[in-house]
Amino acid sequence: MAKYVCDACGYVYDPAVGDPDNGIAPGTSFAALPEDWTCPECGASKDMFSPQ
């Protein structure tokens, strides 16, 4: 699964890790993230992320 980088702050969403602090299990693809998910570092929306 592809990693995605936040264009605002550089945070990298890695599907292998997920976002456990925000209830996103490891193995969750970027496309499967809830539409209201935001960057855990800066709060940017999903549309501010680009494939890495």
Image: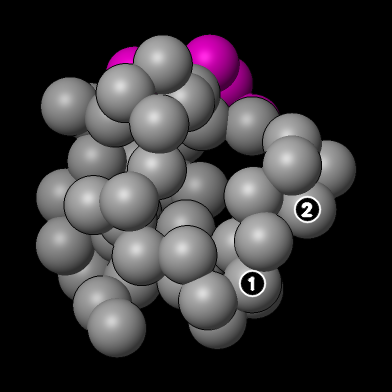
Q: Give yes or no for residue 43 being in the magenta stretch.
A: yes
x and y, in percent, of residue 24 in the image: 64, 50
**Quadrant where the image shows the N terminus:** bottom left
Q: Residue at x 64, y 72 (%)?
A: 26
x and y, in percent, of residue 33 in the image: 40, 43
Q: Is residue 22 above or below residue 1?
A: above
Q: Earlier in the sequence, mark 2 or mark 1?
A: 2
Q: Is residue 50 above or below residue 36?
A: below
SS class of the residue under badge 2?
A: helix
Direction from residue 3 to residue 52 in the image, left or right: left
Q: Is residue 49 above or below residue 32?
A: above
Q: Which residue is mark 1?
A: 26
Q: Give yes or no for residue 3 being in the magenta stretch.
A: no
Q: Main secondary structure of the magenta part?
A: loop
For this rendering, which residue is in front, 6 or 47? Answer: 47
**Residue 8 visible here:** no
Q: Residue at x 16, y 62 (%)?
A: 51
Direction from residue 7 to residue 40 in the image, left or right: right
| Chain part drawn in magenta | 41-45
Q: Is residue 47 above or below residue 13?
A: above
Amino acid type, label 2: Pro
**Quadrant where the image shows the C terminus:** bottom left
Q: Which residue is mark 2?
A: 20
Amino acid type, label 1: Pro
SS class of the residue under badge 1?
A: loop
Direction from residue 33 to residue 47 in the image, left or right: left
Q: Alpha-carbon neighbours of circle 2 within 10 Å: few (<14), some, or many (≥20)?
A: few
Do tag 2 and tag 1 residues touch (Cβ < 8 Å)? yes
